[in-house]
Each structure stands twice: as C-alpha cells, then as structure tokens.
Amino acid sequence: MKAPLFLLVLIALTISCNVDKSNERQFEINQTLESGKHFFVQDSSQYAPEFISQLRTFDGTYSSIQLIGKYIIMNETDTCSIPTELPINETVYYHATKGDTAYNLTLKRINYTNIDYDFRVNDKLVKNGQVLLPADLCLARESTADNGEFFLMTQYFDTKEIWACIKIEIENANRASFYILSDNDSTMNFKNVPLLKKK
C-alpha cells in the first residue's frame, strides 16, 4: 500500500510543480509585430497597459524591443532605465510654501509606470489620482533649475478629467513639481506651484 501511495504523492507534486511553472509565465508577452519587430515583456503585470501599448507602437528604427524589470532594451544593446527612485508601495511626502500658501504633494509608486498622488493647498484637497510614465520616457526628461542648480526630472501625466503633470527628480527624488491645467474650470489651474521638496 505504501508504494502506490508514494507514487500518487509523487504524481501530485509533479502536476503541482508544472502548474506553478506555467503560472510564473502567464504575464509574459513574446510576439512578432506586424512590422516584423520582436516585442518582449517579461512580466506585463508590472506596467500600465497603456505603457505597453505605447511601447508596442513606438516608432523607431529598431528590430527588437524588450521590457525587463526597469529596463527598456532596443536592438539588444540600447538600454533606457525606468526611474525607481521612489520606493515601491511607500508613501513619500513633498512640501513647499509661497507666502501664506502651503502646498503638499503625496506620492506612492505602485509599479514601474504608475504613481498614486494627492495634491493639497493649505490642507484642502485639490486633486488626487494616478499619473503614468510615458513610453518615450527617455525623450521626456527635462532639465529644471533650482537656485542656479540644474538637474534632470522625469515627467508623469494624468490625462483623466483634468490634465496634470508631475515631475520627479532623477537619481534621488528629493524634489518634485506639480502642474494642473483645466480647460473647463480655471479655478483648478495651478501653473506656478513652487518646487516641492521631500519632507
């Protein structure tokens, strides 16, 4: 009786291992596009679907594009790194004052491309939501000045209802900027928010 029981346990473990292995790869994208270019994403659950769609249709003279962790690799040699200065699933607070006005921005990175945000002026909520990293992030970096010091920032966008842009300092995320532009409600416009600094 022991031998058949052992055999059944062994078969069950083998099936279990096979199921686990297939689940590990369920979010992988590995395809040849209509253009003939090879497109590979190691784990699509780590990025916004919009980011993957933008990357899939990214125009350029490349034969392959791979998205592996925080790296975008074109032609297996040209590498662009997705910013990960903000810790994953941790809340980071930014603050600035201008006269009697206090500005507070709260950020929380939830994956490689999406950041939850909450923007308040004098403790009153102005807007919250989620900003998305654009697929052309290597081209969307911007130089910003602070007291004569120039540094690079990466832009993230929220285009739902009211357009918003958040820029985060590359390398250490010590500084951030926030900008809102509303076509329908001018009271929602915040074009001159001072540079916010990490608390």
Image (cartoon, helix red, strand yellow):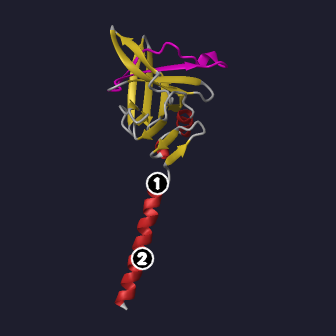
Amino acid type of the residue that numbered disc 1 sits on in the rendered structure? Arg
Front position in the image: 77 or 50: 77
**Residue at the disc numbered 1:** 25
Badge number at residue 11 = 2
Q: The C terminus is located in which quarter?
A: top left
Say what secondary structure mark 1 lies in. loop
Q: The N terminus is located in which quarter?
A: bottom left
Is residue 183 part of the magenta span, yes or no? yes
Q: Which residues are magenta?
A: 172-199
Q: Is residue 110 visible?
A: no
Residue 35: image location, x then y, percent:
58, 36
Residue 30: image location, x then y, percent:
50, 47
Please give the name of the residue rendered at 35% of the width and 88% of the height, measured from the top-left corner.
Answer: 3
Please give the name of the residue rendered at 65% of the width and 19% of the height, measured from the top-left corner.
Answer: 185
Say what secondary structure mark 2 lies in. helix
Residue 172 sits in quarter: top left
Determine crowd level at label 1: few under 14, some 14-19, many 20+ residues with C-alpha closer than 10 A. Answer: few
Residue 9 sits in quarter: bottom left
Amino acid type of the residue that numbered disc 2 sits on in the rendered structure? Ile
Determine crowd level at label 2: few under 14, some 14-19, many 20+ residues with C-alpha closer than 10 A. Answer: few
Front position in the image: 113 or 70: 70
Note whether 79 is above or below 10 in the view shown: above
Residue 121: image location, x then y, percent:
49, 21
Residue 197: image location, x then y, percent:
36, 21
Please give the name of the residue rendered at 38% of the width and 19% of the height, measured from the top-left corner.
Answer: 152
